[in-house]
Amino acid sequence: MTVAFQDARDWSPSSWTSRHAHQQAEYADPAAVARVIDEIGRLPPLVTSWEIEQLRSALARAARGEAFVLQGGDCAESFDECRSEPIAAKLKILLQMSLVLVHGTRKPVVRIGRIAGQYAKPRSTDVEVRGNVTLPAYRGDIINRDGFTASDRAPDPTLMLRAYERGGLTLNFIRALVDGGFAVLHHPEYWDVSFAAGSPHAAQYVRMVESIRESLDFVSAITGV
């Protein structure tokens, strides 16, 4: 977008249409796009208002220097990766990274996942050329598919619905993991040192883990989390 909104009150679900988009798919049937957008608008939201307010409060604490923000995730997600194993693995990596930050900063970490909706992919050109064949560029699973055929590369508005559904599935699985204690930094799974057995650096790793545990205890004591 070329012009920033001056005030949050300028925003509405359709206000984006008044801005120039530098990365926009060319759909063959605008009416089909409108129908999909209307259907998505009638679906339940992916996040709740209280989740948004919780994030706003956490970011405000970080802005005051009371916490550290960590954001991580894929450049672009794919529908095929909407499975429990990849989702749990990404969440675990984000949590493990936050452990190191807690250890280094002695502050709480606001963990933000670039996940559950990152299905669009900006491109430097509108087309892709292979040999004598020129097709529209792959813009992410929310727009078209990565197979190099005319049907795969044709922008399909129904993929927006699939992206919304995949985003909801991913979010609900993450919520279930968090509610089940997966995101508790003291989770024993994060402290497994068996892989280091026999390594010349095993003792150093154990000391580092113990130091991180002490940092977590310190943060828990002053924040109650």
Image (cartoon, rainbow, N blue to C red):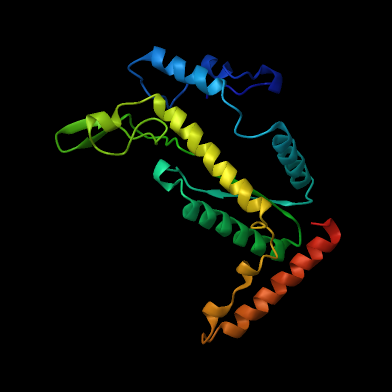
- Whether 126 is drawn above or below 10: the answer is below
The answer to whether one can see residue 115 in this image is no
Question: Image quadrant for the C terminus?
Answer: bottom right
Frontmost residue, 178 versus 199:
178
Frontmost residue, 190 versus 181:
181
| Residue pictured at 61% horizontal, 29% vertical | 45
| Residue pictured at 42% horizontal, 32% vertical | 142
Q: Please state the horizontal and vertical placement of residue 95, each as a whole percent of the image.
A: 62, 58
Q: Please state the horizontal and vertical placement of residue 147, each as a whole percent of the image.
A: 27, 39
Frontmost residue, 176 versus 144:
176
**In this figure, what is the number of numbered marks?**
0
Frontmost residue, 54 versus 171:
171
Q: Quadrant of residue 24?
A: top left
Q: Residue pushed farthest left? A: 132
| Residue 180 left/right relative to 148 | right
| Residue 19 left/right relative to 137 | right
| Residue pictured at 51% horizontal, 87% vertical | 198
| Residue pictured at 75% horizontal, 52% vertical | 67
